[in-house]
Amino acid sequence: MHPAKTPVTSRGRAKHVIAVLVVPDSVALEVTVVHQVFGPRMAAIAELTGDVGSAYEVVLCGEEPRQVLPSGVDFGELAPLETLLTADTVMVPGVENPLAERPRSVVRALRGAAEAGARMVSFCGGAFLLARAGLLDGRRATTHWLFTEEFCREFPQVKLDPGCLYVDDGGVHTSGGIFSATDLALHLLAEDLGQAYAGDVGRLLVTAPRRPGAQAQFVKDSIRIAGEPALGSFLAWLREHLHEPLTLAGLASQVHLSERSLVRKFRRATGMTVFDWINRERVAAAKVLLETTDHRISEIAAMVGFGSAETLRRHFERQVGTTAGSYRATFRATPAAS
């Protein structure tokens, strides 16, 4: 294993410095991902592959000199926050409380690192910290799909794309749920050292250098506890009638509103157009049927209101990022009957 190139370094250093921000509720697994991908190989692996040493220096830093994480993990002494200001790359692992406010010192350090030219990276809920520092304003970004509503409400100036495993927007990189931290880390490794080397590291980790599909295939809205939004009873009625041919005129009549009033109230309540919401719900219903039944895709299309298999396929791939057949193979609860 030999890299095809070397990562950019600064300040006359021989190694590319990665500063990892550790806060009181950091997710330990994502801190470890950084070490596994960018740190030196374990001795037994290095002996067999010849991949000795590392082009990177990984430094854990934080506001406190030591931090025991909620999982009980203690990474030992931490470098001071100021380390972020001279790093080549700053990585913010996911956090257990993404909605929590952060100390001004942490926000200032992140902002200062970006102003100094560091490549900024977040995993999972770490995107909330970059957003609090204003580093995602006007940019495409992603985070864990479960927190989409909260993120969009708090940071409307960010172009959130919750369907992606990770987003590369110039010098700022964000990833989705916990295990997509590995996807983004391997992407950055390929950017720095070449795709062939990143592919070999993926083999050592027993993970694909590029996973098929996207984070969208893992989204399941029913996991969230349902609130009662405006138009709640109408949305419940809609879910029960997804299989029927629906028109805007018919829906407006159902709620005793003009079409224009329904369009306005619906967008205010859901953030979506009426038929974008209906298509999303039809795809969600199709997911359940793909996971739990042996119905053919053409049958499922009719059952959820798409009418044809082709229409289902088009909307499914657009929303989920993979085919209906691939989704079924990955997520069905029991093997299909022969």
Image (spheres, rainbow, N blue to C red):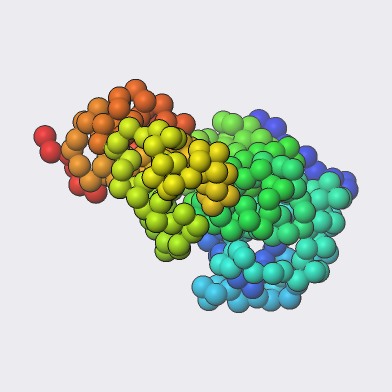
Q: Is residue 190 left or right of residue 130?
A: left
Q: Is residue 222 visible?
A: yes
The image shows residue 252, relative to residue 128, as above or below, that is above
Outermost residue on the left side: it is 338
The image shows residue 238, relative to residue 319, as above or below, that is below
- Going 64% across and 69% down the picture, which residue do you hit? 100
When asked about the image quadrant of residue 155, the answer is bottom right
Q: Is residue 220 left or right of residue 335?
A: right
Quadrant including the N terminus:
top right
Quadrant including the C terminus:
top left
- Residue 317 position, x and y percent, is 42, 31
- Residue 86 position, x and y percent, is 84, 55
- Going 50% across and 38% down the picture, which residue do you hit? 259
- Going 60% across and 64% down the picture, which residue do you hit? 98
When asked about the image quadrant of residue 193, the answer is top right
- Residue 126 position, x and y percent, is 63, 58
Return the residue nearer the eye: 294 or 35.
294
Q: Is residue 338 left or right of residue 7?
A: left
The image shows residue 231, relative to residue 193, as above or below, that is below
